[in-house]
Image: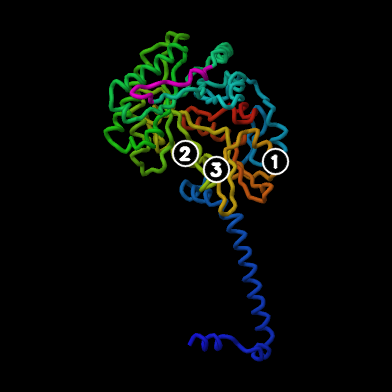
Amino acid sequence: MARRRERRGEPSQDLRKERIGPETREEKLNDSDASERKLIGIFILFFIIIPAVSVLVYVYKYGSGTKRLEPVITERGPIKTDINFQEILTENTNVAGNESQRNYDYPVLAYITPWNSKGYEMAKRFNSKFTHLSPVWYDLKSHGNSLILEGRHNADKGWISELRMRGNALILPRIVLEAFPTELLKKKKQMDKAIDLMVTECKEMEYDGIVLESWSRWAAYGVLHNPDLRNMALKFIKQLGHALHSVTSTRNPKQQLQLVYVVGPPHSDALQQHDFGPADLQSLSGSVDGFSLMTYDFSGPNNPGPNAPLNWIRFTLRLLIGSTGNNAQRLAPKIFLGINFYGNDFILSEGSGGAGAILGRDYLSLLEKHRPQLQWEKNSGEHFFVYFDDNNVRHAVFYPSLMSIYMRLEEARFWGTGISIWEIGQGLDYFFDLL
């Protein structure tokens, strides 16, 4: 039966010759069109749709994005979306304004990492632009049945002295809480020991307080899925805040030691138990001086795209503090809105997805080598470009620009928040003109 259908479905050569000309031409055209459509489809799929898919996802989820596309005139000159690689290569080291003048009156927290020495230099050079400086120096770890605070060997007292001679920025080293959370939170002696270690380090090293990071670690351990342990975690943060506030600064007797707490953005408005949500913000607001909100790393190797879409930032702030009312006005000043000074280089080729963080020097090298055309993605409020590497592998690079940073600084002003920068050694010099 199958053979009969094959024979019946296949016209003879004689019948083909006897067909009217236009029909034959139509078949050929249809075949040609189909091939062209197939090639076009493949091109669109791999070279347009796949790189843009993450952008489309957040556009549909978060809205139409910003419409501010006209150049903005500032003291350093026009800031615009229509830029080219040569402008960046030529101007990135030119700091046009007064290096000590602040353009915004809200708090500015800047992170500095010991593995990137440029951050130390930027902190000294632009000291007056910052209200808080957080060198990433410490880890609090379990050590047998006890605890140990590691990192004093990273501390640079000479650098701190220089900073304090140049300006008034508070020095709050970051401490990552890596101790086993169940042991720490369930045992009062462990909890008291952890708090004592951190407060004592502040006294002995004459710090102005600390930045504490623990929420993401607790979430990874599953602590925050347990209601009892979750409450103990909140209790620990409150006790630490009260302990720090009971100590006055050695430099300023009127100033208490401060606690800034690092939090990640909720993943959606349907909060999960491990998310840091508005109720947590309310609960801790009386004990914590500020919340360093990590509004970056929106995209990743599996969903390449912008680092921190502007609409996602707005969504996060609206979820945490609301949009109007006394509550928003009270909580907003305690938020340090996260701004990234690093970028990402995503691999887009099929089957070889991946990404790597890039610093300013890496970005400039890519611009110089590939001379790309920079594009402005208005829904995210970020610049990006596409290039092919030496192995003909396609990449997309998202890295901050003057316009993208300016828009986020203005967003913080609109909401009444401060900002936190991760981290100042990773950016380009002229970014600091905007602060």
Query: Which amino acid, by three-letter code, is at mark 2?
Result: Arg
SS at mark 2 in the image:
helix
Local crowd at mark 3 within 10 Å, few (<14), some, or many (≥20)?
A: many
Which residue does the numbered mark 1 point to in the structure image?
A: 84
Distance from the alpha carbon under mark 1 to that under mark 2: 28 Å
Query: Which amino acid, by three-letter code, is at mark 1?
Result: Asn
Q: In this view, which residue lies farthest toward the left?
A: 228
Name the residue at 60% across, 54% down: 48
Quarter of the image with the C terminus is top right
Q: Label 2 near label 3: C-beta < 8 Å?
A: no
Name the residue at 42% across, 15% down: 257
Q: Is residue 304 magenta?
A: no
Task: Report the span colored magenta.
Answer: 142-155
Which residue does the numbered mark 3 point to in the structure image?
A: 306
Which residue does the numbered mark 2 point to in the structure image?
A: 314
Distance from the alpha carbon under mark 3 to that under mark 2: 15 Å
Q: Is residue 413 above or below residue 30?
A: above
